[in-house]
Image (cartoon, grey):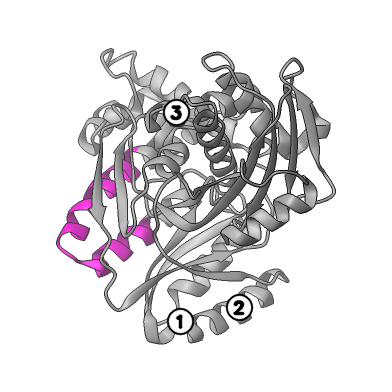
Amino acid sequence: MEKEMIERFQHYFPGNNEEIRLFFAPGRVNLIGEHTDYNGGFVFPAALTMGTYMAARPRNDREFHLFSESFPDEPVSFSAGELHFQNEDRWGNYPKGVVRELLKNVELSGADVYYYGNIPNGAGLSSSASIGMVTAFGLSKMAGKPFRTLQLAKLIQHVENNFIGVSTGIMDQFAVGFGRKDHALLLDCSTLEYEKVPLVLGNYRLVITNTNKRRGLADSKYNERRAECEQGLEAIRKRKKDVQSLGELSIDEFRKVQDMIEDDKVLRRVRHVVTENERVNLARKVLQKGDLVVFGELMKQSHESLRDDYEVTGPELDALFNAQKAVKGCIGTRMTGAGFGGCTISIVQNDVISKFKRQVQEAYEKETGLAPVFYTCEIGDGVKELR
């Protein structure tokens, strides 16, 4: 991959290849704990071996010229003095926002930058956090001012919230930064304390299935769900004033205050967050015991809650879920990511993966008219320099 990256970079940016540096940031999959991160709850993500590769060479001016293989007809150029969000720059707004934030703390030269990514765009595997993290990590290293991983995660979250305009939590950036091979991360989003939990799959593999229904996170109802959770928290605090986030509530505590929420829709949103948080804590315990079957049941319960209480699944994700849980040898499956399209994550027995793909594809195409794409994935490391 390194040799190919250098060759592709030279094709678009001829010149001295001695100064070219290579970086990588993974995508991520969330095993369980969806829409809990921005509510101060627990999440359980893992970094993937697929992600975003970046080759970069410094320039003698303050110009940034970007090319992405994922968007070959949309090269982006800007100067350090013109760092404003522009719709026409589309994907280029992510690295532009990163440069803008880095310049508050680091003196950057310009750069020629080439990206190659093998994360499906819009699939919910965090391609935005991946390109953001690899850009921030790489440019700060090239400037001789590397940031700590947590600083980078917070910086990219700030870019997404305040430059791109999407109210993401910090889970994606955290997983992309701190990921470790063959481990999942149990992250407390209220304190950012985390634990690396070994993910021992034995005779099972993780299979990601892409609905091939594109979803734009900024255009989805993500921000609406966040506002509904804040509305629910505000109602609860009229009785329980010391609660700072929904993630603090146990199920028993929620039952004692749920009557404060008059809007049934808001009540269901809050119920999902509280019960999902409980599922994440249970998931950690059963994985530590090596009980994949119970973990798989918790995954199914998570999807059902996201479907019924949080309403972020939709026909395509539900069609996959129904087809996948019907396959003998698939012990757990659920949507992963923000929802409204994107992907499911399943735990499938090794010797039935081919059967799983065949049966799911047949059922899904019959119901939706769309062809799913499957990825049998590995858990990998976080952001790093390759050369």
Mark 3 or mark 1: whose residue is earlier in sequence: 3
Say whether residue 282 is visible. yes
Which residue is at 46% across, 23% downward?
230
Left or right of 191, for residue 25:
right
Q: Vertically, is 323 above or below 303?
A: below
Q: Secondary structure at mark 1?
A: helix
Image position, residue 365 (x, y; %): 67, 75
203 in magenta: no
The numbered dot on residue 353 is: 1
Distance between mark 2 and mark 3 Cα atoms:
45 Å
Amino acid marked by disc 1:
Ile
User: Nearer the viewer's eye, disc 2 or disc 3?
Assistant: 3
Image position, residue 97 (x, y; %): 64, 26
Q: Which residues are magenta?
A: 274-301
- Magenta residues, dominant SS class: helix
* Position of the N terminus by quadrant: bottom right
**Mark 2 — residue?**
361
Amino acid marked by disc 2:
Gln
Distance between mark 1 and mark 2 Cα atoms:
12 Å
How packed mark 3 is, by other alpha carbons closer than 10 Å (few <14, some 14-19, many 20 or more), is some
Image position, residue 173 (x, y; %): 46, 37
Mark 2 or mark 3: whose residue is earlier in sequence: 3
Mark 1 or mark 2: whose residue is earlier in sequence: 1
Which residue is at 31% across, 47% downward?
185
* Nearest the eye: 18 or 3: 18
Outermost residue toward the left in this view: 289
Could you tell me if the residues under marks 1 and 2 are in contact, i.e. CB atoms within 8 Å?
no
Q: Vertically, is 358 above or below 231?
A: below
Image-quadrant location for residue 240:
top left
User: Nearer the viewer's eye, disc 1 or disc 2?
Assistant: 1
Which residue is at 79% across, 48% downward?
12
